[in-house]
């Protein structure tokens, strides 16, 4: 009798295990996720989740596709080529305000890493009307607001994806991320100190950065899929 009970328990445990595994199997269509920038360490968590199978364990098919110089993450979301993208909060608010409804399904960055690096050791706050580099694909909304609020009237000069203009001396200052371009400048041999670096997070502009966004239409139809992605 005891052996029968053990056998029955074994069957029940096996059934539960099968059901659990089935629940974790990827469901529905592939979700294409596009980070807002080229492949870099900033997005390491997504790469790890893909390679280690964390998305699969949560039951969602995820394909990571990076933007190109001619096709930004935002454009991919607008055209439904990507179902989810990462985006800075300020940029997302600007888009929503312009009438493009989106939903934040995951906030990954709680602090702001943007800085202004000034040439020739000058304090960026003393350079009214200076030529300042800004990314052509966006991400500079907070800096534009700061320039207006502080009456700096910066002359914004757009660049694609590197610090060459600033390094060559064509700019008075440039926007940079403390975890990315800032170190490119150090590696290029520029002398940088706290005297010529303005950190937004230290001056009342610590606005959250990256989150993951979907169109509201897609989210309303795929709430379960969105939740699985966020849980991974």
Image (cartoon, rainbow, N blue to C red):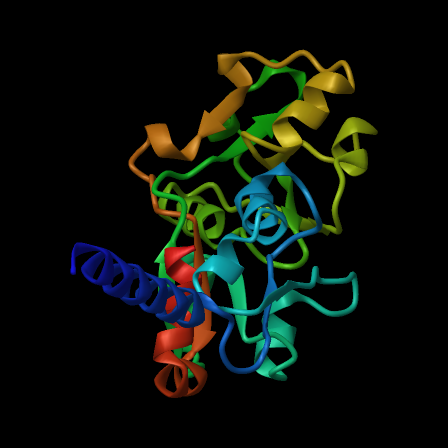
Asked whether residue 104 appears in the rendered view, the answer is no
- Image label count: 0
Quadrant in which residue 170 is drawn? top right
Whole-percent x, y for residue 101 in the image: 40, 81
- Is 78 drawn above or below residue 33 in the view shown? below
Asked whether residue 1 appears in the rendered view, the answer is yes
* Quadrant location, the N terminus: bottom left
* Residue shown at 56% from the left, 69% from the top: 61
* Residue shown at 34% from the left, 28% from the top: 202
Whole-percent x, y for residue 44 in the image: 58, 41
Left or right, 133 with reference to 200: right
- Is 107 drawn above or below residue 81 in the view shown? above
Quadrant in which residue 222 is drawn? bottom left
Whole-percent x, y for residue 114 in the image: 49, 37
Whole-percent x, y for residue 85 in the image: 54, 65
Most foreground residue, 204 or 64: 64
């Amino acid at each position: 009798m005891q052996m029968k009970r053990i056998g029955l328990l074994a069957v029940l445990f096996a059934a539960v295990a099968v059901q659990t595994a089935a629940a974790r199997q990827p469901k529905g269509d592939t979700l294409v996720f596009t980070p807002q920038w080229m492949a870099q360490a900033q997005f390491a968590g997504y790469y790890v989740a893909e390679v280690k199978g964390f998305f699969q364990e949560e039951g969602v098919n995820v394909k990571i596709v990076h933007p190109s110089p001619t096709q930004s993450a935002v454009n991919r979301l607008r055209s439904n080529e990507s179902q989810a993208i990462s985006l800075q909060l300020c940029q997302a608010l600007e888009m929503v305000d312009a009438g493009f409804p989106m939903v934040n399904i995951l906030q990954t960055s709680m602090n702001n890493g943007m800085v202004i690096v000034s040439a020739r050791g000058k304090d960026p706050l003393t350079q009214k009307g200076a030529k300042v580099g800004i990314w052509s694909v966006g991400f500079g909304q907070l800096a534009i607001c700061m320039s207006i609020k502080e009456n700096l009237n910066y002359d914004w000069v757009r660049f694609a994806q590197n610090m060459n203009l600033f390094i060559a001396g064509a700019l008075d200052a440039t926007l940079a991320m403390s975890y990315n371009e800032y170190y490119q400048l150090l590696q290029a041999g520029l002398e940088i100190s706290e005297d010529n670096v303005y950190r937004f997070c230290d001056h009342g502009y610590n606005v959250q950065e990256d989150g993951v966004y979907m169109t509201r239409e897609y989210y309303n139809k795929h709430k379960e899929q969105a939740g699985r992605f966020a849980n991974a």
